[in-house]
Image (tube, grey):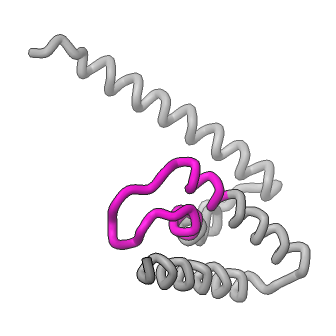
Amino acid sequence: MSTIRVDRVKIGVYSLAGLLVSLAAIIETSRLNSISSSSSGQAYELDAIAAVIIGGTRMTGGRGKIIGTLFGVLILGILNNMMNLMNVSPHLQGFVKGLIIIVAVVFQKRE
């Protein structure tokens, strides 16, 4: 009724999502030299949550800024790279990320 062509918007959004997923799959395949549906992307949700929390978004809700999340991704990427170069166990890496989330939440509670 408001002259928004819903069908075209849906097709455009789904096409863009498919394009971005295919690009992400190509990048993930090149990182791993193969693709396995059983283990690909495992524990990425912890990285995403940690990056957002490190970037300053509150766990209790509220507003966050994109620039803060970008800095959180940068810090987390550097931390992941450092732990990989130091041959830290993947299980310990998850523990360190969880500990960082807890520390960030504690600092946010103090404010």
Let me know if residue 66 is in the magenta part: yes
Left or right of 46? Residue 86 is right
Q: Residue furthest front?
A: 111
Residue for point 44% across, 83% down: 110
Query: Does residue 70 sit above or below 19 in this rendering?
Result: below
Coordinates of residue 42 in the picture (x, y in percent): 60, 69
Location of residue 41 with respect to 1 vertically, above or below: below
Q: Nearer the viewer, residue 106 or 48?
A: 106
At 58% across and 68% down in the image, what residue appears? 54
User: What's the residue at 82%, 67% (across, down)?
Assistant: 81
Quadrant of image for the N terminus: top left
Visible in this render: residue 45?
Answer: yes
Q: Is residue 38 visible?
A: no
Query: For residue 40, which quarter of the picture?
Result: bottom right
Residue 68 magenta-highlighted: yes
Magenta-highlighted residues: 48-73
**Left or right: 10 as drawn, with respect to 42:** left
Horizontal placement of 66 versus 70: left or right?
left
From the viewer's side, name the closer residue of 49 and 35.
49
- Image quadrant occupied by the C terminus: bottom left
Check the image and report above or below for 8 versus 66: above
**Residue 90 location, quadrant:** bottom right
Query: Does residue 69 appear to the left or right of 15 in the view shown?
Result: right
Residue 23, image quadrant: top right
Q: Horizontal and vertical percent for residue 47?
A: 60, 67
